[in-house]
Image (cartoon, rainbow, N blue to C red):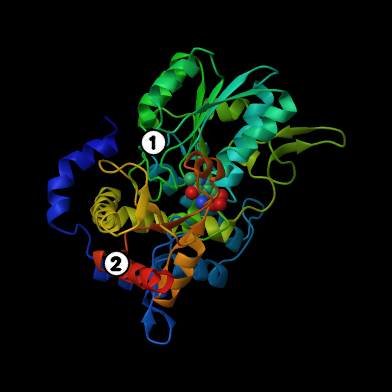
Amino acid sequence: MEPAQKALMLNTGIAAQAMTLDSASIRSEFPTLNREVRDGVPLVYLDSAATSQKPRQVLEKVERFYRDCNANVHRGIHTLAEEATTQYEGARERIADFINAGAAREVIFTGNATQALNLVAQSWGRANLYKGDRIVLTEMEHHSNLVPWQMLATEKDLRIDIIPVRDDGELDQSEFDKLLRNKPKAVCITHVSNVLGTVNPLARIAEKARSVGALTVVDGAQSAPHLPVDVQALGADFFAFSGHKMCGPTGVGVLWGRAELLQLMPPFLGGGDMIKRVYLRDFEPNEIPYKFEAGTPPIGEAIGLGAAVDFLTDVGMDAIWQHEQWLIKYALERLEEFPGVTVYGPAGGVRGGVAAFTLEGVHPHDIAQVLDTSGVAVRAGHHCAMPLHDRFNLVATARASFYLYNTRDEVDELIRGLYKVKDLFG
Ligand code: PMP
C-alpha cells in the first residue's frame, strides 16, 4: 500500500468526525479568499487544481526579495548577488527536503511542470530512445505529459502504448502488465489525475517498470501540492511539479531527477549559467543542477516557492491530505445525490480533491457561468485532458477542486449554486 493510502486508512475514522485543519486561521492567511467577486458576494474558490491562492507569507517573501535584495544569482560577488544566491539556493534545499530528494542538486528549477516534462523528453528521451523503442503513457494524462512524448515519438519514430482507464476511473493494471512484456524504455504517468482525482499506485508501477528496465517519469503537478511526496520511496526516476498549484508564484516549476541520470543527460537549453567553459566552436556543460538552468532563472519565484513549501510544511502535508479527503468525501456525497449530476472518477476510497462532473442537459460552461454569479469559481472544459474526455464520451466537464483552505460550507455553496443552475436551465 502507498504511504499516503496507509495514512488515509488510519485516519478515515478521525477525518469523518472532525475537520482536521483550522480553516478560519488558514483562510485568514490568504488575502484573495477574503474578497468579494460581486457586490456582497464572497468568493468561493474551487479552482485550485488550475492554480492555488497564495498565502501572505509567500506574497511578503517575494515582495521582500524584490524590494531589499534584488540581484542576479551566481554571477556576482557583491552583497546583493550573494544574498540573492543564498536565498535561491536555500529554496532549492527546502524543496529538496519537501520531496525527500537525495540531494539539492537533483532539484532543477524550470518555468512549470510542463517545462519540466519537456526537459525530460527532450534531454533524456532524445539521448536514450531510438527508432522502434516503446514508451508507455496513460489515458488519464494531462496534455503536458502526452504532447512532449508525442513530439519525440514523431521525431524518433517511437511506439506509444497506452494504459487504459477503467469505467471506475482507475488504470487497468492488467493491461499495464501486458504492455510491460514489450519492454518499454519509459513509463510516463501522472501521480494524481487532475480530472478524476485518481491516485495511481506509483510505487508499485515504478517497481514493475524498473523490473523490465524502464524509467518512470511522474507528473506530480496534482500530488506535490496535496499529499506527502517522498520521491525516493516512490522509486520514480523523474518527478515534475509546478509552484503555482502549491501556494507558490507562477513562473516556477521543479524537475526532480536521480543525480546519476541527470549527470549523463545532455543540456536541454543552451546559454548562460549552464556552461563551465565556452569556446568559439564548443562548450563544456556545467554540473547539475545548473546544466539545466540556462539563462537567468525565476529567482524571485523560486524564493517564493521556498516560502510556500515552508508554509505547507508548517501546516503539515498529512493534515492537508486528510482535510482534502474529508472535503472530497462530503462533496461526492452531495454531488451524487443531486438530480442529474454525474461525477467522474473513483466513487470512494483514496481520491484527490477534484470532482469533475456533468449536469444533465446543461453545458459545463453554463454551469460555471451561473455558479460565478453566486461567487463560486469552478472550471469548465477539457482540463487539458482531451483523450480522457473522449474516453468517457464527453466534450467537457465542470470541475470543482479543493485545497487546504476550503470548507464544507463552500461545498454547500456549490450545491446551492447548482440548484440555481437547475432552476435556470430547467
Ligand atoms: N499535469 C497536471 C496533472 C496538471 O493538472 C497540470 C496543470 N493543469 C499540469 C500538468 C501542467 O501544469 P503547468 O501548466 O503549471 O505546467
Q: Quadrant of the C terminus?
A: bottom left
Q: Position of residue 323 (x, y in %)?
A: 25, 55
Q: Position of residue 408 (x, y in %)?
A: 25, 64
Q: Which residue is mark 1?
A: 167
Q: Is residue 89 visible?
A: no
Q: Could you say which is closer to the camera, residue 421 or residue 296?
A: 421
The quadrant where residue 405 appears: bottom left
Extreme residue toward the bottom, this view = 39
Vertical arrangement, residue 158 with respect to residue 212, above or below = below
Q: Position of residue 213 (x, y in %)?
A: 50, 15
Q: Which residue is mark 2?
A: 26
Q: Secondary structure at mark 1?
A: loop
Mark linked to residue 419:
none
Q: Is residue 209 visible?
A: yes
Vertical arrangement, residue 376 with respect to residue 102, above or below = below
- Say left or right for 372 vs 77: left
For badge 1, the amino acid type reads Asp
Q: Could you say which is closer to the camera, residue 178 or residue 397?
A: 397
Extreme residue toward the right, this view = 280
The quadrant where residue 424 appears: bottom left
Q: Secondary structure at mark 2?
A: helix
- Say left or right for 17 vs 85: left
